Amino acid sequence: MAGVSLRFVLDPDLTSRLRAEIVDLWADVSNAGGAVGFVPPVTTADVRVLADPTFAGIADGPDRLLVAYSGDRLVAMLVFGDNRFPLKAHWCVLKRVMVHPDTQGTGYGSALMTEAARLGREFGHEALHVTVRDGLGLDKFYDRLGYREIGRLPGALRVAPDDDRDEILMWLDLAPQPQ
């Protein structure tokens, strides 16, 4: 990750401009085949249907937004999804993990996830959880970052007729970092 220069912003003001940038990013990621809730082709209007409740969970709490900029351009984001259940308060789910497709291979995804782990520890979480769509190699990406597969929901995601994919459950233990 040496040389990766991103500016991270936690809990930015969800202005109409930022909402539009996130919707555009989400559509671009989806149309490039990213596994963030859609199968291409998708329009920004399609994305808004899922984005609006996501924004509400952030604006009204308890979810938190992490965005990453290269210069002034939004290039990556994720949501720390609160479990909304006291028995699960010691860990959280990372949702809508996205890196703009034209920045793939730059180290932005690893930098985003490293920052998420740092913040997760700062928030007092003991673990982070992500789910990934099988067949895209995303499990290998998360494995390199220290996540481990903890289960699969076979055929849980129907991306097309006769194309069901496993949903892979990945887990990162957030042991305290040595000082």
Image (spheres, rainbow, N blue to C red):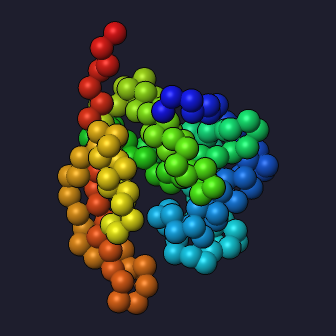
Q: How many marks do you count on the picture?
A: 0
Q: Residue furthest bottom?
A: 161
Residue 151 in which image quadrant: bottom left
Q: Is residue 106 visible?
A: yes
Q: Indicate the position of residue 39 as horizontal and vertical percent values.
A: 52, 75
Q: Quadrant of the C terminus?
A: top left
The residue under the point 35% across, 47% down is 142
Residue pictured at 58% horizontal, 61% vertical? 29
Q: Which residue corresponds to the image point at 48% horizontal and 33% vertical from the top-left? A: 1
Residue at horizontal 62%, vertical 39%? 68
Relative vertical location of residue 125 with respect to residue 100 in this rendering, above or below: above
Q: Looking at the picture, tell me which residue is in the foreground, 143 or 14.
A: 143
Q: Quadrant of residue 8?
A: top right
As drawn, the residue found furthest toward the right would be 17
* Residue 165 vertical position relative to residue 54 in the rendered view, above or below: below
The location of residue 169, given as percent across then percent down, is 28, 56
Residue 98 location (% of width, % of height):
54, 52
Please tell me whether residue 174 is drawn above or below residue 129 in the rendered image: above
